[in-house]
């Protein structure tokens, strides 16, 4: 079942160490966390591994990571997709790799620099993405506190200097 909400973050490359750090934080909350490193593993072709085993196999440059709290959540994921469980939590995925384009058009909806107190009108810009990674996190929903927490964890972890 396809469901879930995609959020895209543009970060410095390689992104793997930051993603590993983010998942370490989730693991503290979900000690039985299971991770699949490809769609094939999610489809049952190969095992989902406990985080302690999967952690060392997180690719530095590009990868797909599918995360469930435990075997029960994985089973529910197969049946209900990214839906939130009764506890307000659900499975999620992180997909990442080098930006496939050297530039991309963006639109600033808020002042990107220091606010000088002047009226701001949104405007178009070009972001040079060469040497950057595109990171997509697929969460159960857009607005919920669980999904919001996951996105914030990812952004914080990618914004830190993390040892590889």
Image: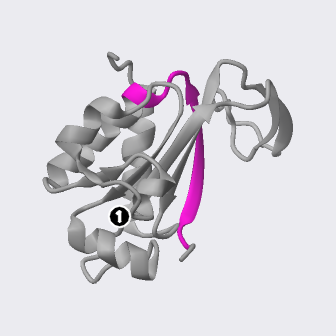
Magenta span: 3-17
> Image check: 73 left or right of 127?
left
Would you identify the image quadrant in which residue 43 lies?
A: bottom left
Q: Position of residue 111 (x, y in %)?
A: 69, 37
- Residue 9: in magenta span: yes
Return the x and y of residue 153 as percentages of the image width and height.
36, 44
> Which residue is rendered at x = 86% and y = 39% of the image?
124
Query: Please, what secondary structure does the residue beneath circle 1 have?
Result: helix
- Which quadrant holds residue 146? bottom left
Q: Residue furthest front?
A: 45
Count of number-bearing discs: 1
Crowding at dot 1, Cα within 10 Å, few <14 / some 14-19 / many 20+, comes out as: some
- Residue 24 in the figure: left or right of residue 145: left
Q: Position of residue 19 (x, y in %)?
A: 39, 36
Residue at 59 percent of width and 33 percent of height:
97
Q: Quadrant of the C terminus?
A: top left
Instruction: Please name the residue that numbered disc 1 is placed on.
Output: 146
Give the percent coordinates (x, y) of residue 114.
62, 27
Query: How is the rendered protein coloured?
Result: one colour
* Left or right: where 21 falls relative to 105: left
Could you tell me if residue 89 is visible in this image? no
| Residue 74 higher or lower than 48, as above or below | below
* Residue 145 visible to an observer of this rendering: yes
- Which residue is rendered at x = 75% and y = 37% of the image? 118
- Magenta highlight on residue 54: no
Instruction: Answer with the quarter of the image where residue 42 lies.
Output: bottom left
On screen, residue 153 above or below 45: above
Above or below, 75 against 162 in this view is below
Given residues 133 and 159, the one toward you in this image is 133
Which residue is depicted at the point 43% across and 81% down? 80
Q: Is residue 29 left or right of residue 141?
A: left
């Amino acid at each position: 079942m396809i469901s879930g909400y995609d959020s895209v973050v543009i970060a410095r490359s390689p992104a793997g160490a930051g993603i590993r750090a983010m998942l370490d934080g989730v693991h503290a909350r979900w000690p039985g966390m299971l991770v699949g490193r490809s769609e094939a593993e999610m489809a049952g072709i190969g095992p989902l591994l406990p985080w302690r085993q999967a952690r060392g196999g997180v690719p530095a440059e590009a990868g797909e990571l599918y995360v469930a709290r435990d075997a029960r959540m994985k089973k529910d994921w197969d049946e209900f997709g990214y839906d939130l469980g009764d506890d307000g939590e659900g499975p999620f995925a992180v997909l990442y790799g080098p930006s496939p384009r050297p530039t991309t058009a963006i639109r600033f909806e808020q002042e990107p620099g220091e606010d000088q107190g002047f009226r701001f009108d949104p405007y178009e810009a070009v972001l040079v993405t060469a040497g950057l990674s595109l990171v997509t996190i697929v969460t159960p929903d857009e607005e919920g506190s669980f999904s919001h927490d996951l996105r914030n964890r990812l952004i914080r972890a990618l914004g830190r200097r993390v040892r590889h």
